[in-house]
Amino acid sequence: MRILIKVSQTIFILFFLYHCLGSRRPIVPGYVDPQGSLRDVSIGKKYMVATGNPLATKAAIKVLEDGGNATDAAVAALLVLNVTNGEAASFPSVAPTLIYENKTGKVKSYIGAGTAPKQATIQWFKEKGYDVMPKNSILSQLLPASPDVIVRLLQDHGTKSFSELVEPAIRIAEEGFPANRILVKNLDLPLYKRLGFTILMPYNSEVYLEKKWWYNIQEGELTKRLDLAKTWKLMSDEEKFALKKGRTRKQALEAVRDYFYKGPVSDAIVKLHKEKGGLITKDDLSEYSGGWEKPVVGEYRDYQILSNQTWTQGPVVPMVLQLLDGVDLKSMGHNSPEYIHTVSQAIELVIADRETYFGDPKFVDVPMDGLLSKKYAELRRKLLQKEAFGKTPPNGNPWAFSSKKPKSKNDSINKHEDQSVSEIKYGKDTTYLSIVDADGNAVSLTPSDFPQSPMVPGTGLTLGIRMTQFRLDPNHPSSLFPGKRPRITPNPGMVLKNGKLWMSFGTPGGDVQSQAMIQFFLNVIVFGMDPQKAVEAPRFRSVNWPDSFSPHTYRPGGIELEESLYKVVSDSLKSKGYKVYQKGHLDNDFGAICAVINDAKNNRLLGVADPREVSFAEGK
């Protein structure tokens, strides 16, 4: 026994010495966290970019300077974010998108979430012993969406080639970039979990740990994504080859898409799924498509708030703001106990409807006109009460305000239970980008997904875990079904004022996304805050419903407060019946808003970036 202890001690000392003396990657010279302190709003006269990483912002600015439009710049920024924020927003996963065309004044929504494989059924998972969707598993992988998004955006609204726009991302992936504090936080695991991560998903470990499971990456260290760069080069070469053969720009872009969904990339994905017992097939990939749709629109005063359809949680934002329209929030005082209580209850009432009605509208009959009816909002507003709800409040009946009739009934709202599932949270969050170009066109896009399931060997591709936002309850609107989209959390937003673009905004943060967006909007509109100060203001978030990710943990009556708020209002909220939880100062668990505001009165664009992450805004 003593010999075993001595051997273990020796191994530990050797690993410790290697960690301290020989394993560090080079620190990028002069690296400083660009958002380590608070900052002023960015001002531009021509265009403005706000993204989750300064390198992505710079890439988008360069595209705009070279004559590209908002869509071109958005694609360049997205691809860079897939590198610098790949542990939170990987290629080729979800990318829900809103586009504003200044010429027409119209907003279009693009469906940026993949579908379940044809073999994925509730019965199949139940027979395998699953009560909730598994994590850290090949079975949690949704069909990839962002390559489809990129090609369709460029074909329909862009001017540049994929090859031009992917070049900055390839360069950064090959030359390396400094690991920032959020990447370090997202990859921070105890030693035993890093070992488990390496055993379960060796290729993931190779990409993110460089096979050094005992070592935790440090801020400022040079970080590369070489395999991802190789994949992009091959996709780029396919476009160049098509152009040399005389194909049109759109046909060459289609060749890029085909290379991914029908060619060598799809072969690599299918090979992985066959080896790991997954469900994605060649037909699933070759038949996949996203598509354009009409956005959801709600109103608050003179503002029209827009989101994607109910395959996201996006409609929560306009619904909550409509519910609060007419409530005298300003008299309560910003972030007073009464204000936090009122806004939280409005959010909880809408979330009760989200859990009852939101699902892929191609599969679920959603009474969207009823949910957005002002009369329905007025009815729900009457349910605001003096005390905390204590648990998720009952859903309403928007069908009474809808022109449609229900085909089926969802009754899962009162079936919330705590679930447990084995998982390693390696990488998390999401990121965001907002761009307004010199012609007034805008893009709002929220990419996401994390390396918590097996990556595709040799490609640098992360297919993520979005199947975990399905339910294995057939009565839930986000129940699993072949070809169906889960109701995902990423939800970009746009706001028009009297029919003209006023703001493009969004945030990472899972279920907190809509809550952070609502608070930021109210900070600016109700309390007249400078937009940057509105981003930096302390936040709160309700957790009084099941989490959108499996295993759907539920903390009835819970509310989280950033540290400065907790010190001031926690006792008052507890007296109202809330279970109050304290979080850190400027904690990215409360989101990281990026926004571009069209200040038409002063003929300028305002860009804001949240210091809770390494977001960065810049314009000209």
Image (tube, grey):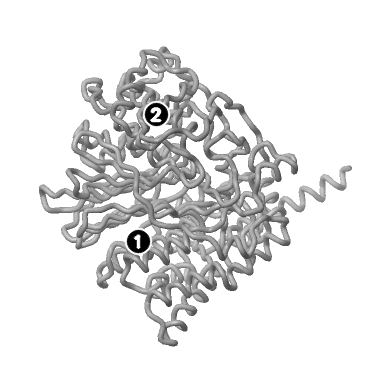
Precedes in sequence: disc 2 or disc 1: 1
Q: Quadrant of the N terminus?
A: top right
Q: Secondary structure at mark 2?
A: helix
The kind of residue tagged 2 is Pro
Q: Looking at the picture, does residue 352 appear above or below residue 275?
A: above
Spot occupied by residue 320 in the image (x, y as percentages of width and height): 34, 31
Spot occupied by residue 206 in the image (x, y as percentages of width and height): 63, 62
Spot occupied by residue 279 in the image (x, y as percentages of width and height): 67, 55
User: Which residue ends up furthest to the bottom in the rendered image?
Assistant: 245
Q: Quadrant of the C terminus?
A: bottom left
Q: Nearer the viewer's eye, disc 2 or disc 1? A: 2
Please state if 461 lies on the left or on the right of 327 as rendered.
Answer: right
Question: For residue 327, which quarter of the picture?
Answer: top left
Q: Is residue 605 visible?
A: yes
Question: For residue 491, which quarter of the picture?
Answer: top left
Front residue (pair 317, 558): 317
Query: How busy is the neighbourhood of tag 1: few (under 14 within 10 Å), some, or many (20 plus)?
Result: many
Q: Looking at the picture, does residue 271 appear above or below residue 500?
A: below
Instruction: Report the residue marked by disc 2.
Output: 398
The kind of residue tagged 1 is Ala
Q: Are marks 2 and 1 in contact (CB under 8 Å)?
A: no
Residue at image point 22% right, 60% down = 47
Question: For residue 177, which quarter of the picture?
Answer: bottom left
Q: Is residue 22 visible?
A: no
Front residue (pair 55, 288): 288
Instruction: Report the residue marked by disc 1.
Output: 74
Q: Looking at the picture, does residue 218 appear above or below residue 498?
A: below
Q: For the residues marked 2 and 1, what is the alpha-carbon distance in whole angstroms?
A: 36 Å
Front residue (pair 219, 489): 489
Q: Looking at the picture, does residue 114 appear above or below residue 478?
A: below
